[in-house]
Image (cartoon, rainbow, N blue to C red):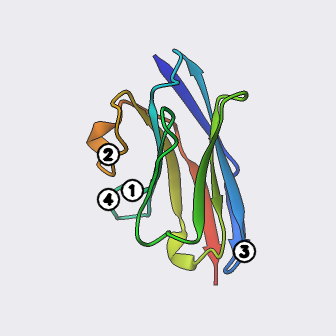
Amino acid sequence: QVQLVESGGGLVQAGGSLRLSCAASGRTFSSYVMGWFHQAPGKEREFVAAISRRDGSTYYADSVKGRFTISTNSAKNTVDLQMNSLKPEDTAVYYCAARSGPYTSSWSHDYDYWGQGTQVTVSS
């Protein structure tokens, strides 16, 4: 089992920045793929970014390329999402996820473990 706990959400004005962090505990997940998804009210959960802990490769949704950066901290067992140039449409609950497969994926069903989510609200 892997437990994931997100932190760092909050309220920010458009154009501002936030850094989300996901702390992982439980089974060693050095070979896992870690991802971030978001879900706005009334909408389906959508892929944001993913990183392979095995080779460091990253994968981003087109809507966040150039604005968001996903990274991992092996010493702290965390995966972070730096979000810059935030837009009102980025408002959503952000979820951290982990999958035991070797490749990054944008499909939520590929992920085995999920955190409880953290709210990000971007005001215009």
Task: Say which amino acid is labelled 1.
Answer: Phe
> Circle 2 sits on which residue?
108
The spot of residue 64 in percent (x, y) is: 50, 69
Task: Say which amino acid is labelled 3.
Answer: Gly
Q: Nearer the viewer, mark 4 or mark 3?
A: 3
Residue sitting at x 58%, y 64%: 68
Q: Mark 3 or mark 1, which is nearer the start of the sequence?
A: 3
Q: CA–CA distance between discs 3 and 2?
A: 27 Å
Q: Quadrant of residue 25?
A: top right
Q: Are marks 2 and 1 in contact (CB under 8 Å)?
A: yes
Task: Say which amino acid is labelled 4.
Answer: Glu
> Circle 4 sits on which residue?
44
Q: Nearer the viewer, residue 79 or 119?
A: 79
Q: Quadrant of the N terminus?
A: top left
Q: Point out which mark residue 56 bears.
A: none
Q: Are marks 4 and 3 in contact (CB under 8 Å)?
A: no
> Circle 3 sits on which residue?
16
SS at mark 3 in the image: loop
